[in-house]
Image (spheres, rainbow, N blue to C red):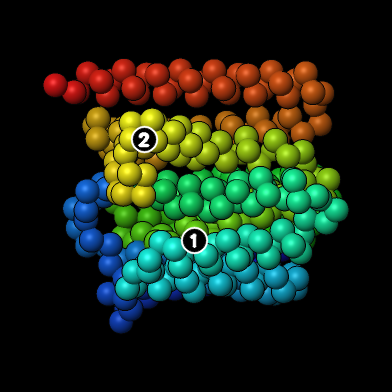
Amino acid sequence: MNYWLLSAEFVFTAILLLYLINGRLAHLALDKPNERSLHTTLTPRTGGLALMAGVLAGWAYLGVQAYWLALPLLLIFVSLIDDIRGLPARWRFLAQAVVCTAFLAIGANGLGWWFIAPLLVAMLWMVNLYNFMDGSDGLAGGMAFFGFSAYGFAAYWGQDLQLAMMNACIVAGSLAFLVFNFNPARIFMGDAGSVPLGFLAAAIGLHGWQQELWPLWFPLLVFSPFIVDATVTLVRRLLRGEVIWQAHRSHYYQRLIQMGWGHKKTAIAEYCLMLLVGMAACYGLDQSLAVVSIIFAFWLAVYVVLMAMIDARWAERLP
């Protein structure tokens, strides 16, 4: 593990973040409070640009294959334009579809179209759900820290040291970002961070599976705190006939904040969940199918209970 590289990346990312908060680019893209927001003041939303700049600089030093740099860069470019001036959803989705399709064309060796098609849908959903879940201080950065830590541990355990370092770079960048994004946040991630992070969560998850470092269930469990909240919320909104692309505040983490938990307590609770889920996923890597099934059943029950408790408390607030 190259700790000098990780330390340099942390410092580099922190310096970029300070410049984006206090320098001439502080007003490049400002997050204006709206009906989805859980904050009340104008805040820079370019933190993801610094985070990803540090990650890709570290990856370039590691000598990763070019597509690991090019594909996230395209997403960063398109997402940054959206952060600054706004882009129609169709153009954002087109860029995401191109990037995910290109990754599968390069990395999904030997898989039939019947399997690639659902993988493409899953990747696109991961890209977007990560963006949906970036609505509270410290949440998306925390998921990156804990989620990619689990990936890095599994890669190191599987003796793929380069992939372990790639994940460690994301962890280092996320930690630097959290210094300025944990409540009270001085800067937000923005689409330029959440979109490529969602892509990398899916892409590295699939890559590790292709390299036989972990089974396909592993990334699903690792990132389940985001996957479950976003997916259940989407299904509920569809069933209620809501326009799903309109801004809202009905995610479970958003409801916790509105019920009085606040950003800090909600983030800490989510961190505990992310840590425990990641540990359970790593523990299950060398276990039998029966043990893995028990782990999944346990966490399914946990999520059902947690969501039911939040739903019940939320219902008490309604007139």
Earlier residue among tags 2 and 1: 1
Return the mark for residue 179.
none
Q: Nearer the viewer, residue 314 or 1?
A: 314
Q: Nearer the viewer, residue 96 or 210?
A: 96
Location of mark 2 (residue): 237
Q: Is residue 165 above or below residue 19?
A: above
**Is residue 30 at all visible to an observer of this figure?**
yes
Q: Amino acid at mark 1?
A: Phe
Q: Nearer the viewer, residue 118 or 185?
A: 118
Instruction: Indicate the position of residue 182 as horizontal and vertical percent values.
Output: 37, 50
Provide the secondary structure element on which disc 1 rests: helix
Question: Viewed as shown, does residue 75 lie left or right of 1?
Answer: left
The residue located at (56%, 44%) in the rendering is 146
Determine the residue located farthest toward the left in the rendered image. 319
Where residue 166 sits, quadrant-wise, is bottom right
Quarter of the rendering occupied by the C terminus: top left
Provide the secondary structure element on which disc 2 rests: helix
Instruction: Indicate the position of residue 259 as horizontal and vertical percent values.
Output: 25, 30
Question: Viewed as shown, does residue 195 lie left or right of 220?
Answer: left
The residue located at (48%, 20%) in the rendering is 304
Return the mark for residue 93.
1
The residue located at (31%, 49%) in the rendering is 246
